[in-house]
Amino acid sequence: MLNFWLVFQVLTILAACADAHAMDASADTWSYFYTHLMSIWLNRFYIYSCAAFGIGIWICFQFIATKAKKQDEKSTEKLTPSKVTQDVLINGYTMPKTKEVYVAGVKVFYGSQTGTAKGFATILAEAILSLNLPAEIINMRDYDPDDCLVEEATSKNICVFLVATYTDGQPTENAAWFCKWLEEAVNDFRFGKTYLKGMRYAVFGLGNSVYVDHYNTVGKNIDKWLWMLSASRVMTRAEGDCNVAKSKHGSIEADFSAWKARFLARLQALCKGEKKPCSGNCKKGKCKSKGKKSKEGSDHEQRVSEQENTEVEDLFETTSEEELGAEEDGSHNSVIDVEDLGKIMGHMKKAKKECELEEEAGRTGPSQQSSGKNEESERREMITPGLRDALTKQGYKLIGSHSGVKLCRWTKSMLRGRGGCYKHTFYGIESHRCMETTPSLACANKCVFCWRHHTNPVGTEWRWKMDQPEMILREAIENHQSLIKQFKGVPGVRVDRFEEGMVVKHCALSLVGEPIMYPEINTFLKLLHRHNISSFLVTNAQFPVEIRNLEPVTQLYVSVDASTKESLKKIDRPLFKDFWQRFLDSLKALAEKQQRTVYRLTLVKAWNVDELKAYAELVSLGKPDFIEVKGVTYCGESSASNLTMANVPWHEEVVHFVRELADLIPDYDIACEHEHSNCLLIAHKKFKIDGEWCTWIDYDRFQELVQEYENSRGSKTFTAADYVAKTPHWAMFGSRERGFDPLDTRFQRKNKTKDISGC
């Protein structure tokens, strides 16, 4: 640029010289030369100044435009392909490209009988909605797979199936048609093997491992049939176990919670476009599952036959993630490579060995199981956080990790002078001094009439951490007294009964669960008697060995809710596979007891009221001292039971049943009645002494006898006849009071919900 300027100036000087030479010779040539040259330079300076100013303006505009362009590029950097979206030019404007949707939503299908699967579906849907994903809950009964299921292959939805299994391996009523359709579709050539290709699904089965032959059959079948129609699993099928002794997480609710957490994590990964879960072999942030497979591995997979693939799928679908060690190495892989089969088989053998060891430990008995600090520390607590919240809301005072106490409504009633429960009428207990508790919230049955609505855990043996009986009794009394104190100063509460209520005299071990499952139940009973507290223990007749080994009880109850195998299965819904034999053995064990024994019959209209002859045969088997016959109490609507008010018999219907039953058992007769509880008492005629019924209990005499028994280490025994007391006239059947104590005032509720809690 400088060279060009110098050349231009030289040319200007030469032009001025030429002009001077052409002038008149008389003129001053050099003067003209200088004048002419200065004129040219002044003109050039003006021109150069204008040009320089223009160039400066142009440079400024270029600088501003460049800076603005850089800012625009920086602001749209997030829309580049290296980020998420790609810019598209439309009508001169830059528009972001629409983000690809990998998961459109989740459809949660449920097949439920007692409402557990339905409840899980609601919980899962709420969790999915919290991830800003659409969720739909579908009752399988209302879904037409013939018209709708194939659409799931292209909808980008995830289908989740929460399905329960009946004890005989059949699906629930609302899932029966769906399962039948799937099974037929698999065997129908018109559908084809790729009918559901593109559909993504996950399965959580609800079952009970007690029924080994049919455990989670429905969940397994749905998983298998969907896979055979080319649908794709998004994660391993999981199985929840109602049998807490075998449940991997302590209860079916905990099993579901663990699976839900894994599913939600998998769902979030799918929403990001991840097609396969992490293999679990990540190192330094690099996932090996995203790398290319080796040539040898690919060639080997291509050589696997269709039969081998089927075997791999069968192995996969019957193996839970825990058995594959997924929780140990962080893997959530839903596809098994042939190269990994050796590792998987190793995990399966290890899991099988652990199960065998657990079964071996289970056969050693409760006392041996509870020995050893290491084994005890590894056991779970029976009361999970969710169960604790549910029971606390129901008014329970929980004790330790497996016990509880609750104030019976009859305790409240007698504090006010409004009458006691049927045990006051039949046996002379003081209801306001009775503590209702249990050392075990777990039960081996799921009775349709249970007023606890099955919030308690279920199991067939003790597999939890165990609290000491001294602590349980101490805290039970303290909590009971705390509940009684709440009635101090309440209008209607009698001062004398309030003061008496602060001293526990009776203990009803019938709150909830199966108290006889507690390994230290005998120690607990002895502690009660040492505190001069009588014991009323209720068992569900599924533990005959424990009944035989039971120490003396003031009064031992066995629930006899049905008289045939079919009706017992339908009403009590027991967990044991050999429940009927256990039931019969329990009644035989009861016949061997020397202290007072009772059959407790709960009449469910249209279910068991027509089994008179069968009941009579059971009476001859167990030879109870007394038979309580009570109409079932309706506890309101519950997803755990289909019981309605139509199943509740009228009191006169109960009386009619009792009369007919008494006619079939000549050694027994009707002794007492408590109309208020819709309950009657049939007593053995040996308790009718000198023409007067003696069904009441001499509690002071019992305490003397049981202490003599303990001091003699069991050599000095006693029988039910040794601590009887005369029954008052008002408690007898046919009396004008119909079992209501005349010292109290009967209170009739009007237009209020009846409190059904109590024993």
Image (cartoon, rainbow, N blue to C red):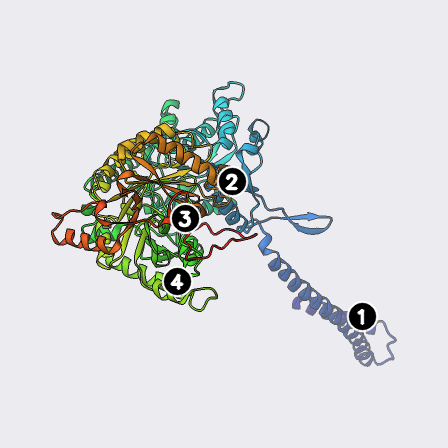
Q: Nearer the viewer, mark 3 or mark 4?
A: 3
Mark 3 secondary-structure assignment: loop
The disc placed on residue 391 is: none
The disc placed on residue 645 is: 2
Residue visible at 57% across and 29% down?
Answer: 144
Circle 2: is it few (<14), some (14-19), or many (20+) Cα within 10 Å?
few
Circle 1: is it few (<14), some (14-19), or many (20+) Cα within 10 Å?
few
User: Alpha-carbon distance for marks 1 and 4?
Assistant: 128 Å
Closer to the camera in the image, 325 or 506: 506
User: Alpha-carbon distance for marks 1 and 2?
Assistant: 131 Å
Sequence-wise, the earlier of marks 3 and 4 is 4
Q: Is residue 670 left or right of 22 when viewed as pictured?
A: left
The disc placed on residue 483 is: 4
Residue hosting label 1? 18
Sequence-wise, the earlier of marks 1 and 2 is 1
The disc placed on residue 739 is: 3
Sequence-wise, the earlier of marks 2 and 4 is 4
